[in-house]
Image (tube, rainbow, N blue to C red):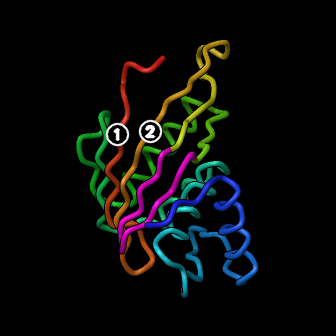
Amino acid sequence: MKTITLLGLACALGTVAEAALPPATAEGASLKAMDPEQTVAQKFDAFNRHDADAIQSLYAEDATLQSPDYPQLQGNAKIADTYRWIFAAIPDARDTISSIETAGSNVYVQFVLTGHLKDAPGKAVSVRIMSVYRVGKHRIESDSTYYDRKTP
């Protein structure tokens, strides 16, 4: 198992760019040669750009997402809609990765979601999250996300 710090993640993202792999878009991305960790790193990059179409293209059509707020979403379109809702509710939402580890096709990411609620701009959001992604054929097939819903 390898651990990548934020600096390591930045280097990994730079390697993807140097390999001339464009960021994922709704039109599809050239995902050849991307390992599971790179696929997940692109998902976080798309999140920080608030690009739900790119996120949708990184999830398999029949992907599942499970979290405390979404017991089981099925399909990349529903998953992308959930991210659109998050971006509307937290207009300055940003994920900061604390650690990322890979074991085969599984990628384990600890990160912090920060931002401010749209209806309460003075109310800061800071949620520690753990996600487990299973990646196959350069697409996220499943996303199991864990966090405390009572986090201020």
Examine the image and state in which quarter residue 44 appears.
bottom right
Q: Is residue 103 magenta?
A: yes
In contact (CB < 8 Å): disc 1 and disc 2:
yes
Name which residue lies at 44% across and 48% down. Answer: 81
Q: How far apart are labels 1 and 2 at the CA level? A: 6 Å
Examine the image and state in which quarter residue 8 appears.
bottom right
Whether residue 93 sits left or right of residue 101 in the image: it is right
Amino acid under label 2?
Ile
Q: What residue is shown with label 2?
A: 129
Find the magenta span and give its range. 98-110
Is residue 54 visible from the viewing direction of this image? no
Q: Secondary structure at mark 2?
A: strand
Amino acid under label 1?
Tyr
Count residues near mark 1 (Cα–Cα under 10 Å), then give few for <14, some for 14-19, many for 20+: some
Residue 16: horizontal and vertical position, in percent?
A: 67, 75
Camera-side residue: 9 or 81? 9
Name which residue lies at 63% across and 40% down. Answer: 94
Whether residue 50 sits left or right of residue 55 in the image: it is right
Whether residue 76 sits left or right of residue 68 in the image: it is right
Q: Is residue 86 above or below residue 18?
A: above
Q: Along the polypeptide, which appears first: circle 1 or circle 2? A: 2
Name which residue lies at 58% across and 77% down. Answer: 29
Camera-side residue: 10 or 67? 10
Q: What residue is shown with label 1?
A: 146
Residue 139: horizontal and vertical position, in percent?
A: 42, 72
Name which residue lies at 56% across and 45% down. Answer: 98
Q: Secondary structure at mark 1?
A: strand
